[in-house]
Amino acid sequence: MSNIFLTEDTICAPATTGGAIAIIRISGHRAFDVADKIFKPQSKSVKFKNAESHKMIFGCIYDGKKQIDQVLATKFIAPNSYNGENIVEFSCHASNYVVQEILRILIDNKVRMANPGEFTMRAFLNGKMDLSQAEAVADLIAANSKASHTLAYRQMRGHFSKNIQELRQQLVEFASLIELELDFSEEDVEFASRKKLEKLLKSIKSELKRLTNSFAKGNVLKHGIPVAIIGKPNVGKSTLLNAIFNEEKAIVSEIPGTTRDAIEDTIIMNDIAFRFIDTAGLRESGDEIENIGMKKTMEKVQQAAIVLYLFDISCTSIEEIKDTIDEFRKTIDDKDKKLILIANKIDLLQSIPHHFKNLVELETIFISAKRKENIQLLTDSLLKSAETGIEEENQTIVTNSRHYEALTKALEAIDQVKKGMDNNISGDLLAIDLRTALYYLGSITGQVTSNEILDGIFEKFCIGK
């Protein structure tokens, strides 16, 4: 068994990074005794062991008789703490020397360094939050946009958990009646109305489908919406990327094939993260390395939610553009993937061809990447494509692949229950599929779990959380 489950230990870790102040956290049944031994309040009338919960006390950390640092000590008495245990937090100066010295003193006093995610894992084990809320803590820390923050914060507050618990409770009630029927099988008694069960299954299936379908949106909002820039060599892909970011992200050269690998970077626009990918130019080439780059281009296009097809408006025919669109649709069989045409180098034209939109049905934006003309039109189009609807207070969007997998398997089990009812199978077989659905729904919130699952989740956390 991993050390992460040894909850009888008293643990410590820095809970902050950077800045002028560092917080060192101690948690466990010996937290107050250890703190009382190494921390002395400035006021001699104050005793740390007698201090109230959630109060800050000014004083010094000592190593024997040697003063290490002036700190603020905060005491949290169980169960009214982050993880339900006795916790002490020392706010000290963020000098690496000071932090390491305090940690050394704690270790000398038999306090163990915490494993990644151990504070939050203990919060889960002590019933302060369920498993999906605990996972949201890590997502909240990693959030790099308002959209990803909103989703993580909502999940941490229990919106998703409540949704799952309601679904599970409805199934539990019917599963218990089915199980009760099994106890009276010889008397041919029906406690669970099959019509009511069918109606319930239809409702649950609809909600599970909505949740699984939301994962595609949730995944890109959490990690950033992937946008691939494709086109022939020298049409200005790298110049466009630099114009969007307003800095030199990619090498710009007149030599065809300069970009041989995908260049990726993220920008936040209107609180939404976009992951732009500048790809190798699409062309036939005898250069083996360049051909590898073009293969990677197609891989990135497959991963992208939005594809910007950039072409040189000064020398590209309508027929070539239509052929490219047709080829794209044959290669990428994904109706949800958005393709936007970007007509570049309008600075080389006397006027923009107004008839263009009548010949090509796709959205087309005319720009000069070199002069940064109409770049705002492009960003406006991207933001419109990324409209999320996450501001709706009660909307649940799935962002976690583990949750998505569990929901998918629960949906499969519900389908099996419905199929069994249509075939008029016995209650004991229905009960098996109902239990399977309950198991997968319970695995999301941690009502059903294992050490292996917990270990896999919390080892991805940073230390001190």
Image (cartoon, rainbow, N blue to C red):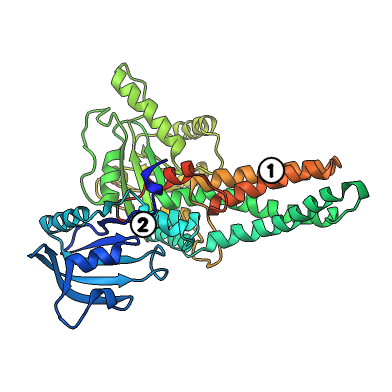
- Secondary structure under tag 2 reads helix
Q: Position of residue 54 (x, y in %)?
A: 32, 75
- Secondary structure under tag 1 reads helix
Judged left or right of residue 411, residue 225 is: left
Query: In the displayed structure, would residue 319 be above or below residue 352?
Result: above
Q: Position of residue 446 (x, y in %)?
A: 53, 52
Using the rendered view, name the quadrant where residue 251 is placed: top left
* Residue at image coords 49%, 54%: 131
Q: Position of residue 202 (x, y in %)?
A: 74, 53
Q: Residues within 10 Å of mark 2 (few under 14, many from 20)?
A: many
Query: In the displayed structure, would residue 365 be above or below residue 49?
Result: above
Query: Is residue 419 at all visible to an observer of this figure?
Result: no
Q: Residue furthest right?
A: 187
Q: Nearer the viewer, residue 302 or 393?
A: 393
User: Disc 1 designates what residue?
Assistant: 413
Q: Residues within 10 Å of mark 1 (few under 14, many from 20)?
A: many
